[in-house]
Image (tube, coloured by chain):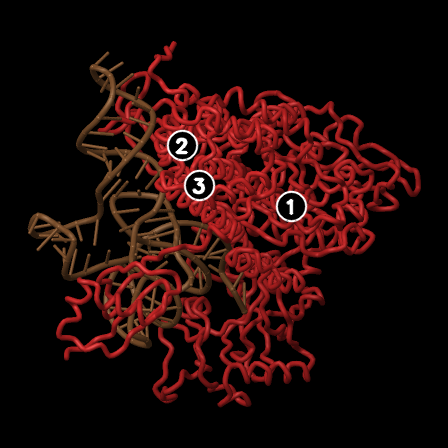
Chain colours: A red, B brown
Amino acid sequence: MSHTSSSESVLSSLSLSYDFQCVEPKWQAAWEKSGVFSVPDVPPAHQPKYYVLEMFPYPSGQLHMGHVRNYALGDVIARYKRAQGFCVLHPMGWDAFGLPAENAARERGVHPKEWTLANIESMRVTLKRLGFSLNWEREIATCLPEYYGQQQKLFLDFMKVGLVERHESWVNWDPVDQTVLANEQVVEGRGWRSGALIEKKKLSQWFLRITDYAEDLLKGLQALDRWPERVKTMQERWIGRSEGAKIRFPLCKPPSSLPQNLHNVTVFTTRPDTLFGMSFLAIAADHPLALWVAEQNPKAAEFVAECQRLGTSVESVETAPKRGFNTGLRVSHPFLDTEFPIWIANFVLMDYGTGALFGCPASDQRDLDFARYYNLPVTPVVLPPQTEQATYRIETQAYTGDGHLINSDFLNGLTPQEARSVVIERLKEQGIGEKVVHWRLRDWGISRQRYWGCPIPIIHCPTCGAVPVPENQLPVTLPDDVSFDKPGNPLDHHPHWKHTTCPVCSKPATRETDTFDTFVDSSWYFARFTAPHALTPTVPDAVNGWLAVDQYIGGIEHAILHLLYARFFTRAMHRAGHVGIDEPFAGLFTQGMVSHESYKDQAGQWVYPDEVERTSQGAIHRMTGESLTIGRVEKMSKSKRNTVAPAAIIDRFGADTARWFVLSDSPPERDMEWTEAGVSGAGRFVQRLFRSVCGVAAENNEILNSEILSSEALTKTLTESSQSESAQQSATNEAAESLRRMTHRTIVAVTEALEHFAINVAVARIHELTSALIATDNLTDNFAEQNTKNTQEEPLKDSLALARFECARTLCLLCAPMMPHLAEEMFSRLCPHEGLVASQPWPKADPQWLTVTRVTMAVQILGKLRGTIDAIPDEEPAVVIARAQAQPHVARFLEGKKIIKTIHVPNRIVNFVVKDA
RNA sequence: GCGAGCUUGGCGGAAUGGUAGACGCAGGAGACUUAAAAUCUCCAGCCUGUAUGGGCGUGUGGGUUCAAGUCCCGCAGUUCGCACCA
């Protein structure tokens, strides 16, 4: 209980602390009631549209600080653009299919659907408490038939336009869990959950033909001028265009039992110019020819098995030496009379090129290592510039640089580049080779042997083959009654779900029990948001009106897969007639991670930050008093227990404080460190700003109630008052003018900062303006005392009070994108007749107050600062220079020197270039 | 190995080629208070100094310029991405 003493002034008794627990729900309700954030299905013709989207969350059950940062950032943009007059689409949904739900089912016996929907419920509560200006009426969850049924429709349409394929492919197979694992889920050759040794298995899989768009996806990157350069580079390399040649080598005397199609080995090379340096041909361990050899020869089989076991994990790649197995088979060279051995080599990948290469040891380090180990010939074919051919040797270092060709028959003397086209021309004439463009990008395998995903709408009929589910039978819904008590895909085990009849011949048939990769779900949700409840995947006017997403915001971890898939999917949807554009995201911003100190107790266990008390010496456990070791600052993660729960922070500090802090410290693209000191500092600022603005509101109540009802009226009054200056008031008027300049300068600075995503700079400017406002608090106190004595009747209407009012009002508008609840509360007290901040236009700076009456100019001698002078803006250069020269410090340095040149940059700098006289 | 980025006080960071270190955090001093908290005011790159001064200073070495944290070239450290890619 606090007692208000009689000596306290009226103003300070009004300085109640900001009670976020009451205020935040109040304004969230007000926004919802007013519908300020909702937008029409088709963007209005008279207003520019703006689509802000943050990557939608996976409903793991816990909202984390990374989400808060991501959505706070997006909300700043959404609210700022809205204030600027844009019609802003800012939707939210859930990437709700995925393996964690199935794991929860297996580990805790919860149904994936219940688990997921409950998680969505609780995360939505926290998200709503943060007060983001989202279009909640457009909320979608990918695990609902309303969404995934339309996805099945898209898939069938993709089939019609030839973008779907089914063929066998190698997969990582976990024999214990009986499922396919993604490469990321294989850790050191073992399944990440079961620990079982992973097998390579060939399975029939559905593929989307993303490679059809390899060229287009690559070229499209160039036009994405609002994407980070590094994301574009990563995609470029992932798509991996390389120009080269395919060369067919016929086997010499193929064994009679060898199938006809293996009588030739085709290699891919980017260096056809080095063909005369060839000393062997190498094929991958899973190359068809290698498999045939393995069948004939147990030793070969052993080597092949060895290669397959090692796989291509990072460690094995770096440490494994280049080894091979000589098959005894030989190929003939296109231009030479020599035969070359075929080796099975562990460094050749079946996935790249044709799974075969010709080895030119002189021009490739791996080939050289291999050749040296097995004593194969090394013939240099490129002579580096300024090198004597007679003495040139390749020892342990292959030469990949430029020069001219040697030992290469008709290519001798040419540069490698010239030689490439010449040799390709010859190969073409002989019909054994051609120029090809090779892509690293593979088709996208989308089959997963899992329950919690979108069913692939296909029926397998023994007579008709794979038949699409007819559209009128969509959606193919997941059965609810599944059990997870045995390994494998529950859909496959279900007693009757998969049994159906063939839509073509009506005979018994089975459903496809594979579900889509969850990346499919997230490849078109941005389009679905434009018509989330439509009975077709998209609605033309809506999707074409709103797309592309003007600003997409998310983590860098999605730089390749999600963003590439979404770009492909949009093109595919375009081809299938579901959207009119190719590039879904016009602007992309990748925000940094949230990190935190980590703590360990003496037993070496990680300790959560909220159990830790920081002392001047270090850290101790809050409960036990045990001293703790402070670990590195790293990304918040459950395993390190260095997480801070957003809900707990909102309870303690309020949503605005949490938002303000995640936005204030670091530039959004960089990682930020969450600190207790930082968030409580943000909390103090919230209180400071609130108190100061409330003080202004109290001073101005009379004026407001009687006269100023709108910002136009305010401006008018301000203009009048600034013209009628009396002698007594000159001191306060000076303060008023300086505050008004500050106010308008801050409008410009904050606007510019927000345009450039420099949210931390915008925050800094708001801090400055707040301090400037607080600095005038005492001035009015004094003045108010005089005023009440002298002019009881006259309302307080001096220029300073009005400047303070303008400043406070501006602060409300400027901080609203970051701290919307606080902004509304302050605004409602300051301008009770003006409605919501959320529907106020962004403040405009008055040019009158951007002009300055005086500037401080730097005076340099030889570029070194020697003093400063005051000047009137755009003052006559000669006058300025004379004054600069006369400046005492400057004059001292000029003594005995001769000025040979004077640089004058108006309003900024005078620089004297001197030499000794 | 290839590619991209980063490097500024004790810390996070600011700075259209023009007064480096805005703003915040942590710190110090003071005011208020019986006291603490809160709040407010002031100080604060380093060295030197009584200083209104002087010297040095944006990882490092060069260069361009009247003037470089900023532009160019090299080097180091560091982070991220890709990688037996033929």
Q: First in sequence: mark 2 or mark 3?
A: 2
Tags 1 and 3 in contact by the CB under 8 Å rule?
no
Circle on res. A766? 3
Q: Does dot 3 land on a helix, a strand or a loop?
A: helix
Horizontally, residue A336 falls left or right of residue A880, namely right
Task: Measure the alpha-carbon separation of dots 2 and 1.
Answer: 29 Å
Circle on res. A85? 1
What chain does mark 3 sit on?
Answer: A
Q: Quadrant of the C terminus of chain A?
A: bottom left
Task: Measure the alpha-carbon separation of dots 1 and 3.
Answer: 22 Å
Circle on res. A335? none
Number of marks in picture: 3
Kind of residue indicated by mark 2? Phe
Kind of residue indicated by mark 1? Gly
> Between A271 and A453, which is closer to the camera in this rendering?
A453
Q: First in sequence: mark 2 or mark 1?
A: 1
- Residue at the (22%, 76%) spot, across then down: A899
User: Residue A269's x, y, as percent?
Assistant: 57, 71
Is residue A309 visible to us here? no
- Residue at the (30%, 16%) spot, across then down: A624
Residues tagged by mark 2 and mark 1 found on one chain of the structure: yes
Q: Does dot 1 land on a helix, a strand or a loop?
A: loop
Kind of residue indicated by mark 3? Ile
What chain does mark 2 sit on?
Answer: A
Tags 2 and 3 in contact by the CB under 8 Å rule?
no
User: Residue A559's x, y, as percent?
Assistant: 55, 51
* Quarter where residue A235 is shown: bottom right
> Between A138 and A366, which is closer to the camera in this rendering?
A138
List the residue tagged with mark 2: A685
